[in-house]
Image: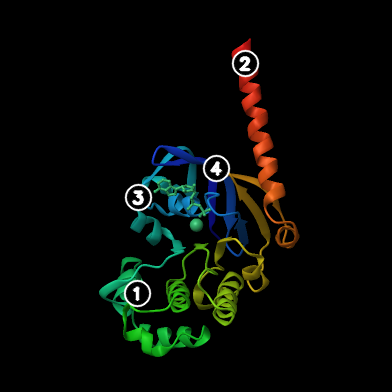
Amino acid sequence: MSTLEIRGVRAAVGGKEILNGIDLTIRSGEVHAVMGPNGAGKSTLAGVVMGKPGYDVLDGTVTLDGVDVLQLAAWERATAGLHLVMQYPTEVPGVMLHDVLSEALGTRGRSADGLDELLRVEAGRIGFDERFLDRPLNVDLSGGEKKRNETLQLAVLAPKIVILDELDSGLDIDALRDCARRVEQMSNESADGHEPLGVLAITHYSRLLQELKPDHVHILANGRIVESGGPELATLLETDGYAAFAEESDADADASASALGDIFSM
Ligand code: ADP
Ligand code: MG
């Protein structure tokens, strides 16, 4: 049983504060959806937790099973059991998928025996064409194929906690269903000796959540979680949009600004 705990995280990019105090706890087998409009800070949250360079963490803690991950390099976070499915997967010419995964398994102290067979089985489960298994990583793949490739790597590496940064972007309906379904299975099953996956699914749309069933839904607006609830919150967003929640958070910001004004006028 694993727990990713994000407490009071504030973070800046290029000197501008983007995250204003994020609290989230994700345990094995739980699916948390973080939904928010463009520019809300969703990818910033993913980058800060995973250790992408360029972010300044101003305050707060991120721990995985009690270990302070903010002190670790990105690759150390990965070997500790954190995994990021990127919004825009990178093409890496000259580096084969098989080699990436066998190195990654080795770094985790796991054997790469049977990797070829596992890749074929997992590719079949998500409709990823086997011809792409012998390609350099993501090179010349369509947007949807890249996301299938990311899902394949996730299934092979079987981390403790995954952050999906808009798995749905660039995916057609069929690919979305296949990938979301596979992640949902991973969050349920404890087959092959892996504990059920804990999921932080970042998305704009509730469509992803029709297959990947969230236990908790959080709305991120202006760098803060302004509302948390159950799956019904995603349905409400679909009908009402983000405007109501964004206004709520602007109103809070105005209230604290005027409170500050009061202090200075005393
Ligand atoms: P989301 O993923 O929710 O669409 P992001 O986390 O990518 O939002 O971005 C949040 C805010 O941070 C945006 O206003 C964006 O312009 C800004 N931002 C992101 N990366 C940088 C950067 N490298 N330099 C300056 N501003 C950035
Ligand atoms: Mg983003």
Q: Mark 2 — residue? A: 263
Q: Mark 4 — residue? A: 7
Q: Which of 33 and 69 lies nearest the eye of the viewer?
A: 33
Q: Is residue 57 above or below residue 122?
A: above
Judged by depth in the image, the label closer to the viewer, 2 or 1, is 2
Q: What amino acid does circle 1 point to?
A: Leu
Quadrant housing the N terminus: bottom right
Q: Mark 3 — residue? A: 53
> Distance of mark 2 from mark 3, alpha carbons?
37 Å
Q: Mark 1 — residue? A: 101
> Distance of mark 4 from mark 2, alpha carbons?
28 Å
Indicate which disc, 2 or 1, sits on the residue closer to the N terminus: 1
Residue 7 in view (yes/no): yes
Q: Are the two marked residues, 2 and 1, in contact with CB atoms closer than 8 angstroms?
A: no
Q: Is mark 1 within 8 Å of ligand 2?
A: no
> Distance of mark 3 from mark 4, alpha carbons?
20 Å
Judged by depth in the image, the label closer to the viewer, 3 or 1, is 3
